[in-house]
Image (tube, helix red, strand yellow):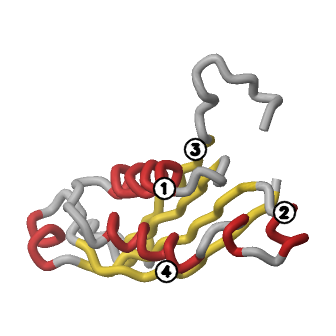
Amino acid sequence: MDVIQLAGMSFYGYHGVRHEERSLGQRFTVDLQLELDLTTAARDDDLATSVDYAEVWHCVQGVVEGPPARLIETVGARIVEALLDRFQRVERVSVRIAKPWAPIPGAHLSTVAVELSRTRPDPPGGDPGQG
């Protein structure tokens, strides 16, 4: 399987358990890995047979800057679901969403992050060996 990566995407969102996180907001960093077959795209030099990075970025932006969630786990799951729904060529999505300077009383750390990976489910009655 081939991979497209978008690393270090930065967005401002209002996710978190604490009131301050949800009212003041904070910066989130997202790293993304999309797994898909890029054989045809590489051979034909045709964006229509790949995934447009700009569209991926805007999709992730819409989630992170969209409705608040209490957990970054939820934000990560929303990103994965949105990407698998929008980009049918993508077979697997891995996302790392980081919250720099998470407000943990007494803690000294630079980042809290969550990584999620999901594979596109096989269509009902589909043969995973086809396609």
Q: Is residue 32 left or right of residue 16?
A: right
Q: Amino acid at mark 2?
A: Thr
Residue in view at x 23 percent, y 56 percent: 69
Cβ atoms under marks 2 and 3 closer than 8 Å: no
Cβ atoms under marks 4 and 2 closer than 8 Å: no
Q: Nearer the viewer, mark 1 or mark 2?
A: 2
Pointer 4 residue: 9
Pointer 2 residue: 40
Question: Callout 4: 10 Å neighbours few (<14), some, many (20+)?
Answer: some
> Considering only order in the chain, which callout, 3 or 1, is on the residue closer to the N terminus?
1
Q: Is residue 28 left or right of residue 47?
A: left
Q: CA distance from mark 2 to mark 3?
A: 23 Å
Snapshot quadrant of residue 119: top right
Snapshot quadrant of residue 106: bottom left
Q: Nearer the viewer, residue 6 or 88?
A: 88
Question: Callout 1: 10 Å neighbours few (<14), some, many (20+)?
Answer: few
Q: Nearer the viewer, mark 1 or mark 4?
A: 1
Q: Nearer the viewer, residue 116 or 92?
A: 92
Q: Amino acid at mark 1?
A: Arg
Q: CA distance from mark 4 to mark 2?
A: 27 Å
